[in-house]
Image (cartoon, rainbow, N blue to C red):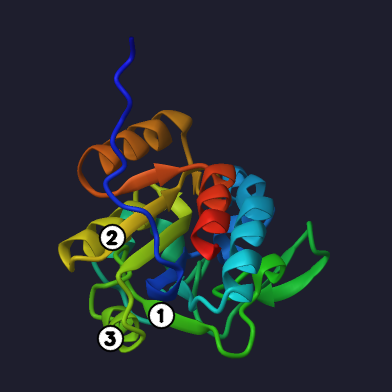
Amino acid sequence: MEEQKQIPYKMEINKAAVIVVDMQNDFVREDAPMSLPSCREAIPNAKRIIAACRKAGMPIIYLKFIAGPKDTLIWTWSPKLFPDVKCCWKNHKRYYPDIDREAEVSDIIDEIYPEPGDVIVEKYGYNGFYNSNLENVLRANQIEYTVIFGALTPICVDDTISGAFERQFKVLAISDATGTFEEEYHKNSLKRIEMKYGRVLSTDEFLAEFEEAKQ
């Protein structure tokens, strides 16, 4: 008989916030410099989660990776941040065929665009907590639980989850609302997160628990 896995915690809606990681044009749109098809595939699930949580009054926080205008160490590992491409630079536009228009490269994608009252936190590295006001935003809202998904495992999503854990926020990572550049890395990331950092749920699993928590 298979032993049933113990659930360490379940989310309390009035103490929870959604953190959407780097779902930006230059990572998600077609023909973007760092285009991630799996992030496009994750959009419908991201929309479902955001819509349900926003309706329940949970804070929706968008992380936005910014590069430029000067060379930093992160450019060494991401050459497309250099001025010849300007991936994720502020005040720079490029054409994306899937929306058939130019758009700000660092902006959040249209499908899940922030609404008035949502929070946007800019960052210049992978971890959403590093040198940002993300922790202050969460503390000001008396948040204990963080629902985290976006772009991408095993980098910015992983680092942000590690940052949340280190600051004593309980993590719920949404496996199929998160993109990656290689499936093997994605699976390994989820295994690592579930082993030491937080709970890993599918969108359906999360929304089922969410409905239970509302009752």
Q: Secondary structure at mark 1?
A: strand
Residue 31 visible in the current orientation: no
Q: Secondary structure at mark 2?
A: strand
Q: Amino acid at mark 3?
A: Asn
From the image, state whether disc 3 or disc 2 is nearer to you. 2
Q: Which residue is mark 3?
A: 136
- Quick one: label 1, few (<14), some, or many (20+) residues within 10 Å? some
Compared with 115, 48 (above or below) is above
Q: Are marks 2 and 1 in contact (CB under 8 Å)?
A: no
First in sequence, mark 3 or 1: give its number: 1
From the image, state whether disc 2 or disc 1 is nearer to you. 2
| Residue 170: % across, % down | 28, 60
Observer-nearest of 118 and 92: 118
Q: Which residue is mark 2?
A: 170
Q: CA distance from mark 2 to mark 1?
A: 22 Å
Query: From this viewpoint, which residue is outermost toward the top?
Result: 1
Looking at the image, which residue is at 33% across and 9% down? 1
| Residue 195: % across, % down | 23, 37
Observer-nearest of 168 and 214: 214
Query: From this viewpoint, which residue is outermost toward the right?
Result: 100
Q: Which residue is mark 1?
A: 122
- Quarter of the image for the C terminus: give it: bottom right
Residue 75 visible in the current orientation: yes
